[in-house]
Amino acid sequence: MPAGSNRKRERQYEHIKESVRERGGGERRAEEIAARTVNKERARTGEAEQASRTSVEDISSSRRGGLRSHTGARGPTKDQLYAEARRRNLHGRSQMTKDQLLRELGY
């Protein structure tokens, strides 16, 4: 459980961890996903001392899960791919589709 958490976050952590385990994830993977999710929610609500820009500005973990439920694993979002292409200074990125970005970035 991440340091500085309250009871609500502890319950959230355990619920996420259990959910990942029920879906066949390993113990270490379940702990990692749960900790990352709880830490992001803490950052979004101002409970954490430090917060990355993406933790605060990006779509919330619960909303992302709802949008992606029942669709299977589809990898990173187009916005995430575009941000990576910008970091790598990939030319023509603004005109690329998600599939093109995936291919150019080597995913």
Image: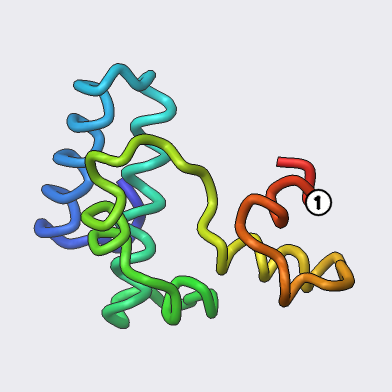
Whether residue 53 is situated above or below residue 83 in the rendered picture: below
Q: In the shown orientation, is residue 34 left or right of residue 51?
A: left
Q: Position of residue 79 (x, y in %)?
A: 56, 68
Residue sitting at 27 percent across and 57 percent down? 67
Residue 72 or residue 62, whichever sits in front: 72
Q: Quadrant of the N terminus?
A: top left
Residue sitting at 83 percent across and 72 percent down? 92
Q: In the shown orientation, is residue 62 left or right of residue 57?
A: left
Mark 1 highlights which residue? 104
Whether residue 63 is situated above or below residue 16 in the rendered picture: below
Q: Position of residue 9 (x, y in %)?
A: 18, 57
Whether residue 75 is situated above or below residue 82 in the rendered picture: above
Q: In the shown orientation, is residue 55 left or right of residue 92?
A: left
Q: Quadrant of the C terminus?
A: top right
Query: In terms of image quadrants, where is residue 56?
Result: bottom left
Residue sitting at 31 percent across and 82 percent down? 46
Q: Residues within 10 Å of mark 1 (few under 14, many from 20)?
A: some
Residue sitting at 37 percent across and 73 percent down? 43
